[in-house]
Image: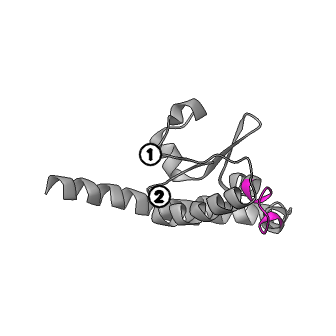
Amino acid sequence: MIYNDTCPICAREVAQYKRLTARHDLDIAYEGLSEGDLERYGLSERDAARRLHVMKDGQRLDGVDAFAAIWERMPGFRWLARVVRLPLIAPLARLLYDHVAAPALFALHRRRERLGKLTRRG
């Protein structure tokens, strides 16, 4: 999973996934955008900050598809993966994530970046 580890909301959610991964000995690796070489995934730092990404079987999944790929492996979340893949739910979930949740979180990320630059200068 490639996620925005500088986002407090994203980091909190992924921390829950990491606990489940450890508790159930799941083979899932996590890489925050500030931690690794994103180019090997075909991502810039900006792309990685815009949405969640998962590498599965050599293919990069983004957004809702990435969440579903993670949820299907985690006890307690498998039902959610099935729900967001339902024919009527999938387009709505993608619409909400792509046009509401992801842009809002990215806007907060950009704001934190700007404030951080101002603080370092001041």
Q: Amino acid at mark 1?
A: Ser
Q: In terms of secondary structure, where does tag 2 sit?
A: helix
Q: Nearer the viewer, mark 1 or mark 2?
A: 1
Q: Residues within 10 Å of mark 1 (few under 14, many from 20)?
A: some
- Residue 27 in the magenta stretch? The answer is no
Q: Residue at x 69, y 62 (%)?
A: 20
Q: Amino acid at mark 2?
A: Phe
Q: Position of residue 75 (x, y in %)?
A: 79, 64
Q: Which residues are magenta?
A: 70-78
- Residue 75 in the magenta stretch? The answer is yes
Q: In terms of secondary structure, where does tag 1 sit?
A: loop
Q: Position of residue 15 (x, y in %)?
A: 57, 62
Number of disc labels: 2
Secondary structure that dominates the magenta span: loop
Residue closest to the eye, 25 or 102? 25
Quarter in which the C terminus is drawn: bottom left
Q: Which of the 4 image quadrants contains residue 71?
A: bottom right
Q: Position of residue 56 (x, y in %)?
A: 74, 41
Q: Is residue 120 left or right of residue 79?
A: left
Q: Residue furthest left?
A: 122
Q: Residue at x 55, y 60 (%)?
A: 102
Q: Residue at x 86, y 62 (%)?
A: 87
Residue 106 is marked as 2
Residue closest to the eye, 3 or 85? 3
Colour scheme: one colour
Q: Position of residue 67 (x, y in %)?
A: 70, 57
The residue at which mark 1 appears reads as 34
